[in-house]
Amino acid sequence: MCEPITATAAAGSAAAAGTTAAATAAAASPWLTYGSLGASLLSTAVGVYGQVQSGAAAAGQARYQAQVAENNRIIAEQQARPAAKVTACCSAMPTSK
């Protein structure tokens, strides 16, 4: 029959198992550290690239909208001119009674 385990003996066994796991994790941790550092840098680089592309797209959209506004101004100006000429021309014509 086995002898009963005391709390002190159980804690000692758990501590020894924890030390072994900690030593294994410490041996693998440089790779984990470099891997997580690499993933973090990659994530940052992708985020920066996305922000740059977003800024370039916004600038292009602003240029497009400015050109549309300029075209609309020119069209409105051209449409206003003939209407003024027609009104001036027709008011100078004699009316038949």
Image (spheres, rainbow, N blue to C red):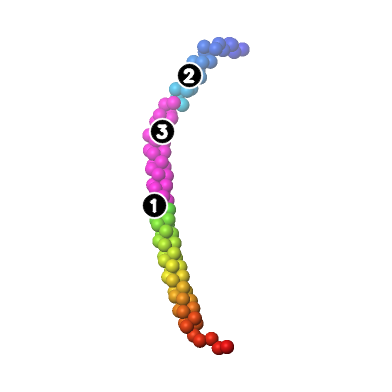
In the image, residue 95 above or below residue 81 = below
**Mark carried by residue 70:** none
Instruction: Using the image as rendered, state which of residue 38 and residue 30 is in the foreground.
Output: 38
- Residue at 61% in and 12% down: 1
Point out residue 23 in the picture as x, y percentages from the top left corner: 42, 26
> What residue is shown with label 3?
28
Residue 33 falls inside the magenta stretch: yes
| Residue type at the position of mark 1 | Val
Q: Is residue 45 left or right of residue 93?
A: left
- Residue at 46% in and 76% down: 84
Instruction: Using the image as rendered, state which of residue 91 and residue 7 is in the foreground.
Output: 91
> What residue is shown with label 2?
15
Q: Earlier in the sequence, mark 3 or mark 2?
A: 2
* The C terminus sits in image quarter: bottom right
> What residue is shown with label 1?
52
Q: Which residues are magenta?
A: 22-51
